[in-house]
């Protein structure tokens, strides 16, 4: 079992003993998403830590998007719940890149690839994404690449 999945399971037990409903529900949801990813495909397999991290990143993105939708529909209590769940998920994700760090990585990658103009955006994104995976949202990355190339 991956170390991250072990940590999720141990934290679930702790949350259940503490009768922390929000954390318990969120950890159960996270473990269910991991289990679903494990059995997806032709045969069931154990996920590595980086694959578990990818599942958790997707779950965090779902929570952010749901909170935005609930806010736009004047459902503040549901948006607050989604944000609270996202806060719990983020405990298990690597620290996000600051705007300055992202700007530096993008400019460094543009220099490395020798890209010029918007036609080279795909080339820059292809080289950049492995460097920022899990540490920056793809939309944020593409906006910065677009800004620097445009």
Image (spheres, helix red, strand yellow):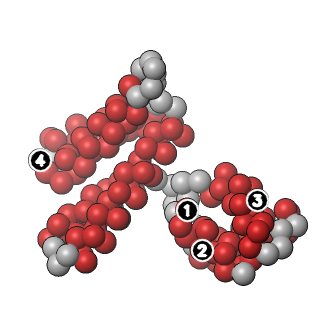
**Residue drawn at point x = 41 percent, y = 28 percent:** 40
Asked if labels 3 and 2 touch by Cβ distance under 8 angstroms, the answer is no
Binning the other alpha carbons within 10 Å of mark 4 as few (below 14), some (14 to 19) or many (20 upward) gives few
Q: Is residue 64 left or right of residue 94?
A: left
**Residue drawn at point x = 34 percent, y = 31 percent:** 35
Residue at disc 1, secondary structure: helix
Q: Quadrant of residue 140?
A: bottom right
Residue 78 coordinates in the image, percent (x, y): 17, 66
Asked if labels 3 and 4 touch by Cβ distance under 8 angstroms, the answer is no
Instruction: Say which quadrant the C terminus sits in.
Output: bottom right
User: In whole angstroms, how far apart are the C-alphas of marks 2 and 4?
Assistant: 42 Å
User: In whole angstroms, how far apart are the C-alphas of marks 1 and 2?
Assistant: 9 Å
User: In whole angstroms, how far apart are the C-alphas of marks 4 and 1?
Assistant: 36 Å
Q: Is residue 131 visible?
A: no
User: In whole angstroms, how far apart are the C-alphas of marks 1 and 3?
Assistant: 15 Å
Residue 138 is marked as 1
Q: Is residue 1 left or right of residue 71?
A: right
Task: List the residue tagged with mark 4.
Answer: 19
Q: Pick out the residue farthest to the top.
A: 43
Of the pair 18 and 94, the residue shown nearer to us: 94
User: In whole angstroms, how far apart are the C-alphas of marks 2 and 3?
Assistant: 15 Å
Residue 143 is marked as 2
Rendered view: 83 above or below 41: below
Residue 58 is marked as none
Mark 2 and mark 3 lie on one chain; the one further toward the N terminus is 3
**Residue drawn at point x = 71 percent, y = 60 percent:** 122
Q: Quadrant of residue 74?
A: bottom left
Residue 59 coordinates in the image, percent (x, y): 37, 51
Residue 97 coordinates in the image, percent (x, y): 58, 67
């Amino acid at each position: 079992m991956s170390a991250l999945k072990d940590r999720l399971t141990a934290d679930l037990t702790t949350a259940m003993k503490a009768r922390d409903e929000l954390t318990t529900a969120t950890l159960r949801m996270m473990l269910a998403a991991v289990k679903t990813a494990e059995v997806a495909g032709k045969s069931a397999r154990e996920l590595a830590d980086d694959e578990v991290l990818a599942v958790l990143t997707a779950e965090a993105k779902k929570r952010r998007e749901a909170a935005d939708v609930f806010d736009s529909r004047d459902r503040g209590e549901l948006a607050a719940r989604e944000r609270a769940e996202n806060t719990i998920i983020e405990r298990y994700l690597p620290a996000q890149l600051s705007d300055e760090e992202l700007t530096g990585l993008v400019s460094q990658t543009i220099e490395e690839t020798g890209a010029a103009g918007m036609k080279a955006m795909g080339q820059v994104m292809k080289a950049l994404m492995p460097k920022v995976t899990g540490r920056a949202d793809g939309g944020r990355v593409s906006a910065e690449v677009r800004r620097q190339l445009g």
